[in-house]
Image (spheres, helix red, strand yellow):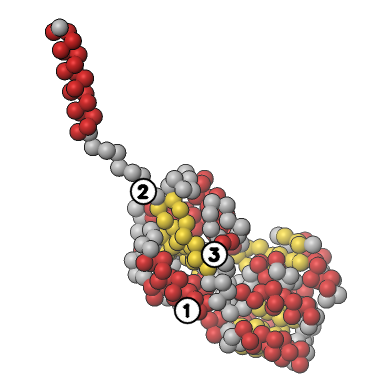
Amino acid sequence: MKRRAVIAGLALGTLAVARGAPAQPARKVYRIGILVIGTASDFGGPQPRNPQVNAFLRRLGELGYVYGQHFMTEPRGSEGKPERFPSLAAELVRLQVDIIVAPEPALPALKHATSTVPVIMAAATDPVGQGAYVRSLGRPGGNFTGLSLQSVEATGKRLELLKELVPGTAPVAVLWNPPHMLDWRVTEAAARERGWKLRSLEIRDAGDIEGAFKAATDARAGSLLVFAAGILYPHRRRVAELAIKSRIPAMYELRPYVEAGGLISYSADLTDIWRRAAVFVDKILKGAKPADLPVEQPTKFELVINLGAAKSIGLTIPQSLLLRADDVLQ
């Protein structure tokens, strides 16, 4: 009887300890906001259709994060309408996401919407100057950090490649809008230094695109340089089609224009930038502050050529360019 009493007492004591033990806290599932100019459905879920965001999530996986277990994404897309960014940015802030990742077109709205939620720039055109998202590349000083696009620095190289593709004295038409004022000024300076003529094609809204191409044709432009402004990017397929229809060889700021049917692009590798953005997310989720994380510059640039587009306008790509191309689309 005494033995049974002892066993019963031990059992009750163990049960009491188990009941009194504190429950293990549930693991926090981080929420990562993604704000882009496209359709949100292309950027959502563990395997998004968008190649850049897909690369971002794969890199998070390599860093030990499991989708649905350690983090979830909250994708928001402007559906090609930059004017929607302010409301979408405010929505992500209201959701109290832990961090937001976004490319250049969405950054001004995020700067206005929050000074506390960490924002990772997935390619900012000019984070210190025109954008003023950070105080300096080395010491951001606020809630923004991430990666720059270095598009302005690549402007001279684009012009040189375009002139190698289409030599001659005909002017280069430049398609740009106000957010790319700095790019236009740098292009002017680069062309002046090299003795090349330019024809400015400034647009204010998407309705100006067709008229800009007519102006380029009327000016007998020999080639076209297109900056990937917020207005133009959602209409990149239309821009590429108009360049083909006008038979104007066009150099684009970003690869997605070439994937949409454009001729040639030279820029930082966007997929690589989004992969590297995942490292910033990892550091911040582990306690680092955006203010203390230096903005990184791209280390990988790519020259992409679309042979189908070249054939459509009867242009032969010089062998010297083909040999230097990082990717040739058929």
Q: Quadrant for residue 31, please give it.
A: bottom left
Residue at image mark 1: 130
Of the two numbered discs 1 and 2 on the same chain, state the one appearing first in sequence: 2
- Write down the residue under mark 3: 40
The answer, for residue 9, to whether it is visible in the render is: yes
Quarter of the image that includes the C terminus = bottom right
> Around disc 2, counting alpha carbons within 10 Å, would you say few (fewer than 14), some (14 to 19), or many (20 or more)?
few
Relative to 288, residue 94 above or below: below
Query: What residue is shown at x 15% (from left), y 7% (from top)?
Result: 1
Name the kind of residue labelled 1 in the image: Gln
* Alpha carbon distance from label 3 to label 2: 24 Å
Q: How packed is label 3: few (under 14 Cα within 10 Å), some, or many (20 or more)?
A: some
Disc 2 marks which amino acid? Lys
* Mark closer to the observer (1, 2): 2
Instruction: Name the element at disc 2.
Output: loop
The residues tagged by marks 3 and 1 sit, at their Cα atoms, a distance apart of: 27 Å
Q: Height in image: 328 above or below 221?
A: above
The residue at the point 62 percent across, 78 percent down is 232
Q: Are marks 1 and 2 in contact (CB under 8 Å)?
A: no
Of tags 3 and 1, the one toward the viewer is 3
Left or right? Give the position of 244 relative to 73.
right
Residue 194 image position (x, y, % from top left)? 68, 82
